[in-house]
Amino acid sequence: MLTDARVYAYSAVLMGSPILLKLFDDNQTLAGQVFRLIKQQENLFTVNRAASEVMAINHAAGQHPVVVSQPVFDLIACAHAVSLLPDSLFNLAIGPLVKCWKIGFQGHRVPSETELQARIALTNPHDVILDDASRSVMLARPGMEIDLGAIAKGYIADVVQAFLRQQQVSSALINLGGNVQTVGAPPEEACWAIGLKKPFGEADELIGVIGVNNRSVVTSGIYERYFELDGVCYHHILDPRSGYPLDNDLLSVTVISDRSLDGDIYTTLLYGLGVEQGIACLAEQPGIEAIFVTRDRQVICSSQRHFSFQLLDTDYRLVH
Ligand code: ADP
Ligand code: MG
Ligand code: MG
């Protein structure tokens, strides 16, 4: 991260994550507005508290449709469409599986095979029924749960970015615990310097530095939330087909894109596709670029149109 005497950094803990806002004016009022905005958005989407619009849908599973606000409907519709893409790892109805593993929460455990199979039966995205006309969402079976944990932060980072632009802010950075969204570049500089974390390293250990302006940088890593049992690492990105954490050769995927929502969607999709198929998929999406970090310490960039990358850790190898 940038260490610059002109930066004013404001922090808070929201959505269970450390939140950091960087501005170039000492503007407590604006920082307060940003944090309130994040809280207000979180209240719409959270599934970790009793009441939210998403929880209202989950409570009515198997019973009746629930009318939601336009932003919630739009985000669910987007998550639904991504869940129905061929070979998509992303599944908005993953809730029952997330809740039975409790990875990153108290009481985490390895569920039995029978339990996993029963939960998988409750995660079919085709059983999420959207009605545009009434702006309602219905979960067809009792026990189903929508979980927007993989994309809510990205959506909210974009809302914050739009708010900052509306307030005529020309240089700012918001980091929502792994989702970085930037406005412009720091004054008189070409770009923001954003650290790529070393998997399973200390908080300040970096593999390298990503340079961007006016872009979002989202990293999803298996080292972010996990637990270990009998030498096996169980992390928080679940494979809806097996019910287990997805097992492949990736430690993290970072997506550089215009919208942080796309960054969030693509980190999950690409994690599921792996390096080769992932790069082929991005060849058709010029606005979306990725940095893959593999278990054998390779760092692979899909392309490098909108960012620069400087490798710092020589244990890792940059592959083009
Ligand atoms: P982080 O919380 O570290 O930012 P991600 O953005 O990668 O992590 O999202 C992980 C969260 O997404 C999980 O904690 C869970 O709530 C949800 N999730 C896990 N597996 C899937 C999946 N296959 N599809 C959609 N959401 C998922
Ligand atoms: Mg994500
Ligand atoms: Mg995330």
Image (spheres, helix red, strand yellow):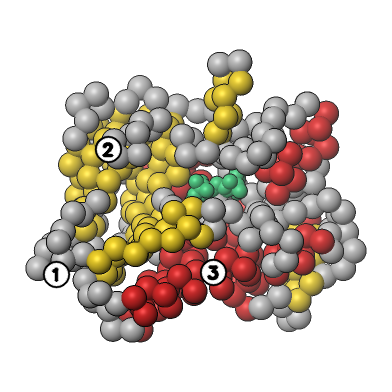
Residue shown at 79%/72% (left/top)?
66
Disc 1 marks which residue?
187
Give the image location of residue 118, x and y in percent: 83, 37
The location of residue 90, given as percent across then percent down, is 59, 48
Image coordinates of residue 244 in percent, x first then y, are 65, 31
Q: Give the residue displayed 44% in from the left and 54% down from the top.
A: 18
Vertical position of residue 291 compared to residue 181: above or below = above
Label 1 packing within 10 angstroms: few (<14), some (14-19), many (20+): few
CB atoms at circles 1 and 2 under 8 Å apart? no
10 Å crowding of disc 3: few (<14), some (14-19), many (20+): some
**Is 213 in front, or is 283?**
213
Query: In this rendering, is residue 124 above or below 164?
Result: above
Q: Amino acid at mark 3?
A: Lys
**Pointer 3: what residue?**
39
The residue carrying mark 2 is: 206
Residue 280 appearing in the image: no
